Amino acid sequence: QGQLVESGGGLVQIGGSLRLSCAASGLTFSTRAVGWFRQAPGKEREFVGADSGYDRISDYATAVKGRFSISRDNAANMVYLQMNSLKPEDTAVYYCAARFGDGGSLYYRERDYSYWGQGTQVTVSS
């Protein structure tokens, strides 16, 4: 059974950067579509970014486009979310997610993903 574990969250100042990591066990990232989501206090979980499995196309929510980027290390079976120019509104618990099977498309909905991590807290403060 596949499992995902996020790490790298923490407290960062406005304008700072963080890189979140997502480690997989029991599944291989290299040919799967992956996504990142976040949930702020009192709000529903929302899409942050997605990366396709084969052709490595990525897309991001408007709120983070140009500041966040997804990358992979296939040898280490890791996926990353690089977050730059952080704002207070980026404060949330961040989750990585992976599709059940191989695929080369982008997926934007929570129900498109079968595997989820437990989340890692990111707090952006002055």
Image (cartoon, grey):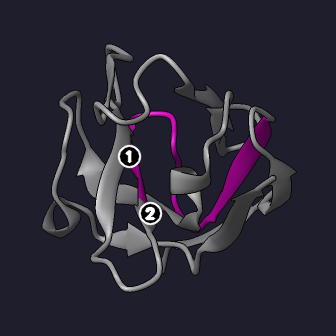
Quick check: 28 above or below 10?
above
Q: How far, Cα to Cα, is label 1 from label 2?
A: 7 Å
Rendered location of residue 87, percent (x, y):
61, 43
User: Circle 2 sits on which residue?
Assistant: 38
Q: What type is the residue that disc 1 sits on?
A: Val
Label 2 near label 1: C-beta < 8 Å? yes
What residue do we see at 22% from left, 65% from top? 110
Q: What type is the residue that disc 2 sits on?
A: Arg
Q: The magenta stretch spans which residues?
A: 17-37
Quick check: 104 above or below 103?
above
Q: Secondary structure at mark 2?
A: strand
Front residue of this view, candidates 96 and 39: 39
Quick check: 111 above or below 31?
below
Front residue of this view, candidates 74 and 37: 37
* Left or right: residue 76 compared with residue 2: right
Q: Residues within 10 Å of mark 2 (few under 14, many from 20)?
A: many
Q: Is residue 6 visible?
A: no
